[in-house]
Amino acid sequence: MLKDKVQAALNRVRPALQADGGDVELVGVTSDGVVKVKLTGACGGCPMSQMTLKMGIERELKKSVPEVKSVESV
């Protein structure tokens, strides 16, 4: 259930990433609320990817899914 909520939230941020030639892929969600994602496409090698991850993806996920504690790139 938590994974479904996280996937739905990722689907809301995905168009912004795709507009810049990137994407995000959900790898998994731990029982303690850590979301593991993989940035792909242009986002995979972008020097700003950590900022995108924390200020964009993590912020949206925490707002939409309160159970999320953090987001990590793998």
Image (cartoon, rainbow, N blue to C red):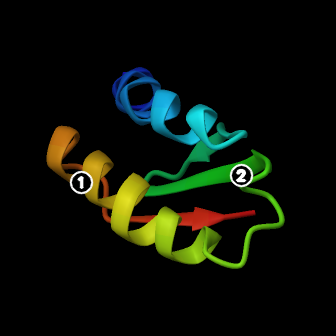
Q: Where is residue 72 shown, x and y percent of the image?
A: 57, 67
Which of pointers 1 and 2 lies earlier in the amino acid sequence? 2
Q: Where is residue 22 shown, x and y percent of the image?
A: 70, 42
Cβ atoms at labels 1 and 2 below 8 Å apart: no
Indicate left or right for 42 with 32 as reference.
Answer: right
Out of 61 and 35, give the one closest to the viewer. 61
Q: In terms of image quadrants, where is residue 48?
A: bottom right
Q: Residue at x 27, y 59 (%)?
A: 59
Alpha carbon distance from label 1 to label 2: 18 Å
Residue 53, placed above or below residue 15: below
Q: Residues within 10 Å of mark 2 (few under 14, many from 20)?
A: many
Q: Residue at x 47, y 37 (%)?
A: 16
Amino acid type at image mark 2: Leu
Q: Which residue is mark 2?
A: 39
Indicate left or right for 18 with 63 as reference.
Answer: right
- Dot 2 lies on which element? strand
Q: Which residue is mark 1?
A: 62
* Residue 20 in view of the camera: yes
Q: Which quarter of the rendered picture does the N terminus lie within?
A: top left
Q: Where is residue 51 shown, x and y percent of the image?
A: 49, 75
